[in-house]
Amino acid sequence: MAMRIDALSAPLFVSWQITRDCDLACLHCCTDSAPGRKLKDELDLSEAVAVVDQIVSADVPYVMLCGGEPLVSPHFFAIVEMLGRAGVELKIETNGQRFDPSIAERLAPLPIRSIQISLDADHEDVYRAQRPGGSLAKVHAACRAVRAAGLPLEVTFAPTRLNIGELPAVLERAKALGAFRFNTGRLMRIGTAARRWGSLPPSEAQYAAFFDALERAAQVEPGMELCYIPVDVAEGLRRALVEPPATLLVLPNGWVKVAAALPHVCADLRRETLAQAWAAYRDAWRDAGVIAAAKAAAAHDERHSDANAWRLLPLVNA
């Protein structure tokens, strides 16, 4: 069966987790990141530069750098500036703890599509409860630095039992800070969040009120785009089974995952070119095992907790 991605010679988007290290230990983290969690086999500078060269050579138009916290990586500026100077549009996903005016000014000349900052509360005590070691004041300062440098600000909100009541205030705060987009949805049962699933996710009643509030806010035309569809990982998987996204998810060690909610790895950019990884990704969405796993994960969200137990598909040149 032909798929849209078959007509593409390269992905339209690369989401690159450049490190698992982070300066916060968030309760809801889907990548199992935290201080000192850097993987032993993360790409070094020369290997990261080789991946950048592959992305540029393949004419990939859009790349997101994330983590962990990408600003913790010693390779962050080398990667972002090489990509940006080659004309690749960029999105930077950060918790905002290290993002200051000097960083904003350094990024300003590059083709930045957005700086996405996590804004998970409007009160310091709630923020610190969900993101231990973090400072909400630093997040607000980071948002202001983004806008002062003329960069586009995007925010994200991860709902938990701790912060879901903060949504109305966070929406207003994001709008006041100049965000053009607000991203949210159901909490992902992946990584650190999966291990806290007994106490962390909101109740169904809380979710119902949460999505009602989002729908009302969208109807009022708040001046920023509200993105919460698909509402959860399961819906995303169901859509991918019909039409896989033209996206490669690159892990800190150069492995390429089939999907965030699945453990399957289809390529290794240490050994394979981006073109080979793209071909392997397209093949993976025809693999009976991947399809069965995606269907099972779409039907049973407890399967998502295995997403970070990465395993190589037989088709990977290991």
Image (spheres, helix red, strand yellow):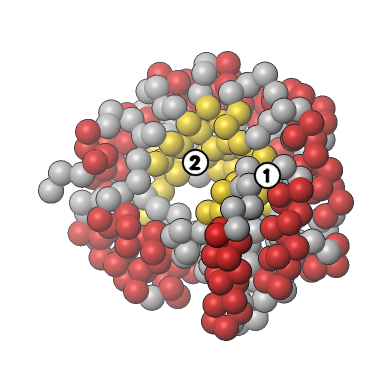
Q: Which residue bears the numbered disc 2?
A: 15
| Quadrant where the C terminus is found in the figure | top left
Locate residue 169, reporting x and y percent.
75, 63
Q: Residue at x 41, y 27 (%)?
A: 60
- Farthest front residue in view: 220
Q: Which residue bears the numbered disc 1?
A: 179
Q: Classify mark 1: residues with Cα within 10 Å, few (<14), some (14-19) or many (20+).
A: many
Q: Classify mark 2: residues with Cα within 10 Å, few (<14), some (14-19) or many (20+).
A: some
Marks 2,1: beta carbons within 8 A? no
Task: Judge whether 240 appears above or below 161 on screen.
Answer: above
- Badge 1 amino acid: Ala
Q: CA distance from mark 2 to mark 1?
A: 21 Å
Q: Is 142 situated left or right of 155 in this image?
A: right
Q: Secondary structure at mark 2?
A: strand
Q: Residue at x 60, y 58 (%)?
A: 220
The tag earlier along the polypeptide, 2 or 1, is 2
Return the mark for residue 275.
Answer: none
Task: Judge whether 291 appears above or below 196 on screen.
Answer: above
Locate residue 117, reporting x and y percent.
69, 46
